[in-house]
């Protein structure tokens, strides 16, 4: 059994908090809303604007932290071993795809029920 590295768990925890904060701010601070309206944000004091933008930018570092951590953890993997690659794909990629599909359905239902919106895929 592999030994856990506490520092990597702390980095992962920080990245989780940053990603959640970033996504929360997108919906709560008007400057970062999807519709692009910034009327209320402009009326904030300069200190409140700087704080909001700083927290938003800091939150955006969560995903790169996850990518860096994933890359670091994959350095010592035997990629030329076909059985390892098959094991990796079946035990990591497939569950991620299933999770992505489930989350997409949940998100679609949320948008429909709460905002009466739906995702439209435009195919030309």
Image (tube, rainbow, N blue to C red):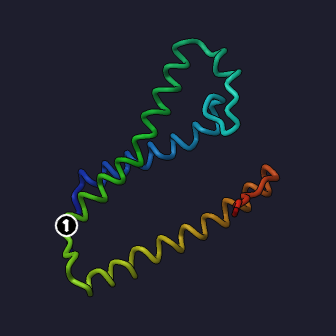
Relative height, residue 24 to residue 95 (above, below): above
Helix, strand or loop at mark 1: loop
In this view, the residue farthest toward the right is 116
Q: Which residue is drawn at the image coordinates 19% and 76% (left, top)?
A: 78
Q: Nearer the viewer, residue 6 or 35?
A: 35
> At 26% from the left edge and 54% from the top edge, which residue is drawn?
8
Q: Nearer the viewer, residue 119 or 100?
A: 119
Q: Position of residue 9 (x, y in %)?
A: 30, 54
Residue 119 versus residue 104: which sits nearer the camera? 119
Q: Is residue 1 left or right of residue 115?
A: left
Image-based side of 87 in relation to 79, left or right = right
Q: Is residue 37 above or below residue 75?
A: above
| Image quarter of residue 40 | top right
Q: Write the residue at 33% across / 84% down.
A: 86
In front of the other: 81 or 22: 81
Image height of 107 relative to 17, above or below? below
Give the x, y percent position of residue 32: 61, 33
Q: Residues within 10 Å of mark 1 (few under 14, many from 20)?
A: few
Q: How many marks?
A: 1
Give the residue number, with chain letter if any, for mark 1: 3
Which image quadrant: the C terminus?
Answer: bottom right
Residue 12 picture location, percent across and down: 35, 52
Residue 98, given in percent of the width and then of the height, sits at 54, 74
The quadrant the N terminus occupies is bottom left
Q: Residue furthest front?
A: 124
Please indicate whether residue 35 sits to the left or right of residue 116 in the image: left
Which residue appears at 47% of the width and 46% of the height? 19
Q: Is residue 21 above or below residue 70?
A: above
């Amino acid at each position: 059994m592999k030994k856990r590295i506490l520092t990597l768990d702390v980095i992962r925890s920080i990245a989780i908090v940053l990603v959640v904060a970033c996504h929360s701010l997108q919906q709560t601070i008007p400057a970062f809303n999807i519709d692009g309206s910034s009327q209320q944000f402009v009326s904030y004091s300069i200190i409140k604007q700087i704080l909001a933008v700083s927290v938003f930018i800091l939150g955006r570092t969560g995903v790169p932290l996850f990518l860096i951590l994933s890359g670091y953890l994959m350095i010592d993997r035997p990629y030329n071993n076909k059985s390892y690659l098959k094991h990796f794909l079946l035990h990591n990629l497939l569950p991620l795809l299933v999770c992505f599909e489930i989350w997409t359905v949940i998100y679609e239902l949320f948008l429909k029920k709460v905002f009466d919106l739906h995702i439209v895929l435009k195919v030309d």
